[in-house]
Image: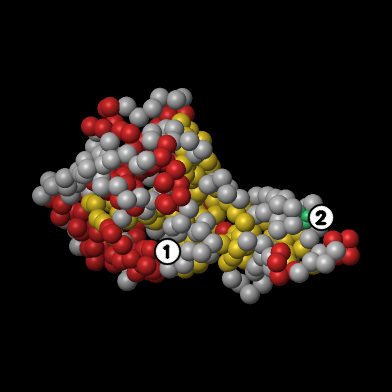
Amino acid sequence: MNELEELKTITQQTLQLRSRDNFAVGAVPTRPPRWAYADKNLFDLEKSELFGRRPLLVGFSCDIPKPGDFFTFDDLQVPVLITRDKQGNANAMLNICSHRAARLKEGNGNARSISCPYHAWNFGLDGKLKKIFKEDSFGEVDKCDYDLQTLPCAEKYGLLFISLDADAELDIDQHLGDLAPWFEMWDLMQMDFIDQYQWQAKGNWKHALDTLFKDYRGMASANTTNTDRVLETVADDERFGPDQQHHRLTFANNALLELRDSDPGTWIAKQLHSVQRVHFLFPNISLLISQTAVELFVLYPGEEPGRHSTRYRAYRRTDTKTIASSEQAQTHFETMRDLIEENNQPLADGHEHSARDDTDQTPSAVMNMQRSCLVAVGIDPDSPARPN
Ligand code: FES
């Protein structure tokens, strides 16, 4: 696959839809019942089944480019440490010392090994116990019994996945399904991290999926000059992956119309900014991949059904012909952050999801994600019954 050619194809398809004045929004499936956003038993099931066992995209290869690089992950209330070892492999482990459960690392950085701040036991970047400080004072210790608890970790196409289930098998290609060739084409290895921000807000994490969609509409507008705005709600809506749980939404803006009567052979990368594609990876990720940037939004359930958090991370692609400067990328990040802050203010202020939200133009992709959440925990979305 060739990224520019694929972008041209999608642009042509979007123009054809536009010429028929028939953007493919499609029939929107029914929204799950209201209790699905507040039921504590369902919330607990989601945390164990959707977030406790499945692959979780926690970052990109460029977040730990060198041996010794690490970052911590606490968004699901389980302390995790992700490292790159001396062999270049990515590892994930609980960020908890195997001796007396002290927390091992904070934030991100680079280290030759993992040294516990409490009694200075020393672990390799793969989690193996290497050295016990003043070993004699601890009596007889079999080092093999004190390795850190490792977690499944897989790295492919520049993506970093972990699972919180120590026994899970991570198969990224299987997880991505027919999206895998797209990620292979993008090969997101060459990126610079720009910035990140996290919102803690009221409201169920699944409601935040709707908010994300609205944020993307705003983003598609903000990414263009003021002569442009989003043409329609969604230009295209495709489903991918096992059980068709992943989605791609294509947003188009007015700049698209300028390409209408021209030869696609003359289109250049810059002109193709008129379509933006957002991938929703089940259950909690949205990922915008453009010629210049990768923007990751991840939703996490909070400690109760009515709380969630959203993490936004922005990266600058350095492998394409239209490389944005760090300053441009930072400005874009701040614009998006402020826009989202504004859109999410009602949730931050404690106004829950309203009846109006049930009738707005939520695309079928978002509704399908919501319904797939029920299916994944064994509930029929067309005849839902509360879990016991
Ligand atoms: S708690 Fe880590 S070495 Fe004791």
Q: Nearer the viewer, residue 290 or 306?
A: 306
Q: Quadrant of residue 228?
A: top left
Image spot of residue 253 (x, y percent): 27, 45
As helix, strand or loop, the secondary structure at mark 2 comes to: loop
Taking the image as shown, residue 258 lies to the left or right of residue 56, namely left
- Residue 231 numbered mark, or none: none
Label 1 near label 2: C-beta < 8 Å?
no
Identity of the residue drawn at 72% across and 61% down: 114
The answer to whether mark 2 is within 8 Å of ligand 1 is yes
Q: Who's the residue at 51% across and 59% down the image?
A: 165
Q: Residues within 10 Å of mark 2 (few under 14, many from 20)?
A: some
226 w.r.t. 192: above or below:
above
Q: Image check: 234 left or right of 162?
A: left
| Whether residue 149 is situated above or below residue 106 in the rendered picture | below
Of residues 265 and 129, the one drawn nearer to the viewer in this rendering: 129
> Can residue 255 be seen here?
no
Residue 224 percent across, percent down from the top left: 35, 44
Q: Position of residue 269 (x, y in %)?
A: 34, 60
Cα separation, mark 2 vs mark 1, equals: 51 Å
Q: Which residue is mark 1?
A: 321
Q: Quadrant of residue 184?
A: bottom left
The answer, for residue 152, to whether it is visible in the render is yes
Picture quarter with the N terminus: bottom left
Q: Is residue 378 left or right of residue 60?
A: left
Where is 353 relative to 294, above or below? Answer: above
Question: What's the residue type where badge 2 is placed?
Answer: His
Helix, strand or loop at mark 1: loop
Q: x%, y% of residue 322?
A: 42, 59
Q: Nearer the viewer, residue 152 or 359?
A: 152
Q: Which mark is residue 119?
A: 2
